[in-house]
Amino acid sequence: MSDSPLAANPYEVLGVSPTASDDELKRAYRVALRKAHPDTGGSASQFDAVQRAWQRVGSPSARYAYDSGADAGSPSRAWSQSGGGASGPQRYDSRPSAKSHGHPGGWYREQYLDHIREWVGRGADLPDPFDDALVRSAPRQIRHLLAAAIAEERSAAALATLGMGFTIWHDVLAGQTRDDKLDHVVLGPTGLWAVLSEDWGAPVSVKRGEVIGTGLAPGEKPLALLGSRARVLARAARVKFSALAIVVEDDQAAQSLTELGTVRGAQGLLVQRSRLVNAIRTGLPGVGVGGTDLFEVRTRLQSAVRFV
């Protein structure tokens, strides 16, 4: 079961109230399983989702653990944790990490906390703003802020493993307001990458070189937006981006890596998160820093980068 703030919880997947009796829960599971089976009009992903939901709440002990937040996979544990700060996510091995700057997910977490308190009511008691029930009951636009923060933090944790040959800047200002930002800017031997980490809570696909899906807002064009923000930083630093990567959860993209075409010379990509590090480390044919000295590009970026 995904711990995305936009994902349905086990009870929602099974189509039953959290207050349902054990017998009602069991009947709902059987009905949901029949409906989700590929032979009866469902799909493999729906069938797996029902089975994962049952594993989380199907037995009294598992249900108690989930309801009390003691479940090892309880969303509130992940939701309340922030990714690495300026030094990057915590590592437990001796391999050199990529040099990181900025606070991945910090801007969206700040926005989430402001909006969730406004929604609950200023002055109201809010002991845990990441409580599972509270997050699930919040409007989608508020939950999406938290989902975006978590997506950034997960990408940052992965990017830190690139190694000492790479430099990463998180939450980079790329416009006039703090809303205009680049989630991650990655520089290394394989080029200069602008990375957008997202969780739209639903599968996405590609149409005419742009990412589309039911979870996106009407008229939302992620690649075009990423390209325009990258262009702002490129002009300020007098550099050229090699690639624009949109990163989503593995189950939200059909392929591990999909090329989206070029945007002002930069290769657009839709990437599953598990493929992100490999894609950047190995690079793409014909993609690089274009003969410009890597140290010079890093120096220009270091002088131009501002954080949100």
Image (spheres, helix red, strand yellow):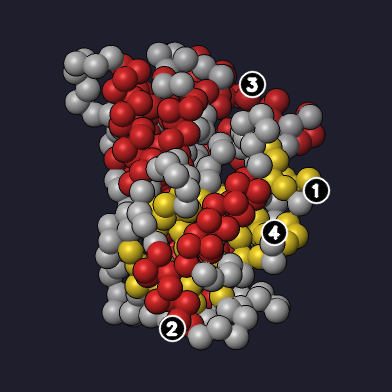
N-terminal label among 3 and 4: 3
Mark 1 or mark 3: which is in front? 1
Label 2 neighbourhood size at 10 Å, few (<14), some (14-19), many (20+)? few
Label 3 neighbourhood size at 10 Å, few (<14), some (14-19), many (20+)? few
102 vs 161, nearest the viewer = 102
Q: Secondary structure at mark 3?
A: helix
Question: What x and y, as percent, mark residue 41?
Answer: 79, 29
For disc 2, the marked residue is 295
For disc 4, the marked residue is 263
Quarter holding residue 218: top right
Q: Amino acid at mark 4?
A: Val
Q: Are marks 1 and 4 in contact (CB under 8 Å)?
A: no
Q: Marks 3 and 4, how far apart in space? A: 47 Å
Question: What x and y, as percent, mark residue 290?
Answer: 62, 81
Q: Secondary structure at mark 2?
A: helix
Question: What x and y, as percent, mark residue 42?
Answer: 74, 32
Mark 3 or mark 4: which is in front? 4
Residue in the picture at 47% in, 77% down: 297
Q: Are marks 2 and 3 in contact (CB under 8 Å)?
A: no
For disc 1, the marked residue is 208
Q: Marks 1 and 3, how far apart in space? A: 39 Å
Q: Marks 2 and 3, how far apart in space? A: 61 Å
